[in-house]
Structures are given as structure tokens and as C-alpha cells.
């Protein structure tokens, strides 16, 4: 199994970060994905609170991958696994949100996966880079939302 770990700190409180994580519609705004593919997704909540079991399909370039939410601990932890992905399999990810000393949120995004034969060396580099970009994008977008609406 291969793994990655990415950490970023946002000045936003956990509630702002959490709202972005559970609403798949926001991901193209702050992450490395280009779009949410609703016709390949299932169980999405119209109010942006996707439940455990929801499958969220995202397009990046020409590739569509899907993730199934497997656990939600309000404002603390989101877990998911791959529902369909051509490059990796047995993917499990955890996003932990912890209040930062002095305010804000520490985002720790980590996961394990297996790569298609012959792709391990490449996927290890790609996943570490991309997942750090995901954590950084989440942190900065949540901070921007908190600055615009400090009342929450």
C-alpha cells in the first residue's frame, strides 16, 4: 500500500472548513478538480450536507473519479473511499479537522491506496503533490469565506 499525508492550517474556524468538505458542489471552487459530475454521483444532498454513502464524482481533465463517503464526525472528520478510479484502487482517505492554537483549523488529509501495476512510483509523487494542493486550497478558501462572513 502507498500513502500520503498533507497538512494545512486555515485561519477559518472548523465550521467553515467543514461546510466546504461536506458539500461536493464547492470542491471545484477550492480543489484541484474541475467539476462535479452529477450524473455519475448519487445521494448528494441538495442543501450541501452530503451524507454517508453518497458517491461524489469529480472530473479532472478527461478523467472522472468517484469517492464514497464512509464517515462523518461533524466539524472533526470526514472519511471516504474510492467508488471508481482507473489509476488507483483500495483508496481510503481521512480528513481530520482540529482547532488550531490561537484560532483557526489544522487540516490533516491522509490516505492509503494501491496503484495500477507499474504506476506506483508516479502515483506516489502525484498523490502527495495533489493532496497537498487540496488541503492548501481548502484552507485558503475557508479563510476567505470566514473573512467575508465573520459571524459564521
Image (tube, rainbow, N blue to C red):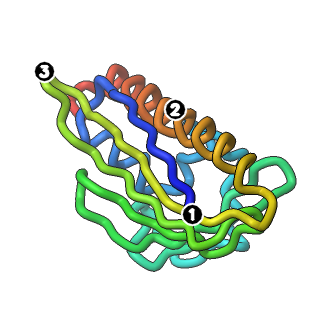
- Mark 1 vs mark 3: which is more N-terminal? 3
Q: Is residue 100 visible?
A: yes
Alpha-carbon distance for marks 2 and 1? 22 Å
Per the rendering, the mark at residue 113 is 1
- Mark 2 vs mark 3: which is more N-terminal? 3
Q: Position of residue 111 (x, y in %)?
A: 47, 56
Quadrant where the N terminus sits is: bottom right
Of 63 and 20, the residue lying toward us: 63
Locate residue 34 relative to residue 2 in the image: left or right.
right
Residue found 61% across the figure and 75% down from its top: 83
Task: Give the residue at the far right of this rendering.
Answer: 62
Classify 10 Å Cα crowding around label 1: few (below 14), some (14-19), many (20 and above): many
Classify 10 Å Cα crowding around label 2: few (below 14), some (14-19), many (20 and above): some
Q: In the image, is residue 44 above or below residue 13? A: below
Rendered image quadrant of residue 106: top left
Q: Position of residue 104 (x, y in %)?
A: 23, 28
Q: Which residue is mark 3?
A: 102
Q: Position of residue 61 (x, y in %)?
A: 83, 48
Locate residue 135 relative to residue 16 in the image: left or right.
right
Q: Which residue is mark 2?
A: 137
Amino acid at each position: 500500500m502507498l500513502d500520503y499525508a498533507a497538512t494545512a492550517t486555515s485561519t477559518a474556524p472548523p465550521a467553515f472548513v467543514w461546510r466546504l468538505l461536506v458539500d461536493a458542489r464547492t470542491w471545484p471552487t477550492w480543489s484541484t478538480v474541475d467539476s462535479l459530475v452529477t450524473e455519475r454521483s448519487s445521494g448528494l444532498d441538495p442543501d450541501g450536507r452530503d451524507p454517508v454513502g453518497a458517491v461524489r464524482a469529480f472530473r479532472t481533465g478527461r478523467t472522472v473519479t468517484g469517492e464514497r463517503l464512509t464517515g462523518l464526525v461533524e466539524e472533526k472528520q470526514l472519511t471516504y473511499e474510492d467508488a471508481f478510479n482507473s489509476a488507483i484502487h483500495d483508496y481510503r482517505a481521512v480528513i481530520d479537522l482540529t482547532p488550531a492554537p490561537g484560532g483557526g483549523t489544522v487540516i490533516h488529509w491522509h490516505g492509503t491506496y494501491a496503484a495500477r501495476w507499474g504506476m506506483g512510483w508516479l502515483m506516489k509523487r502525484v498523490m502527495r503533490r495533489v493532496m497537498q494542493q487540496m488541503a492548501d486550497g481548502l484552507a485558503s478558501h475557508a479563510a476567505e469565506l470566514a473573512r467575508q462572513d465573520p459571524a459564521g
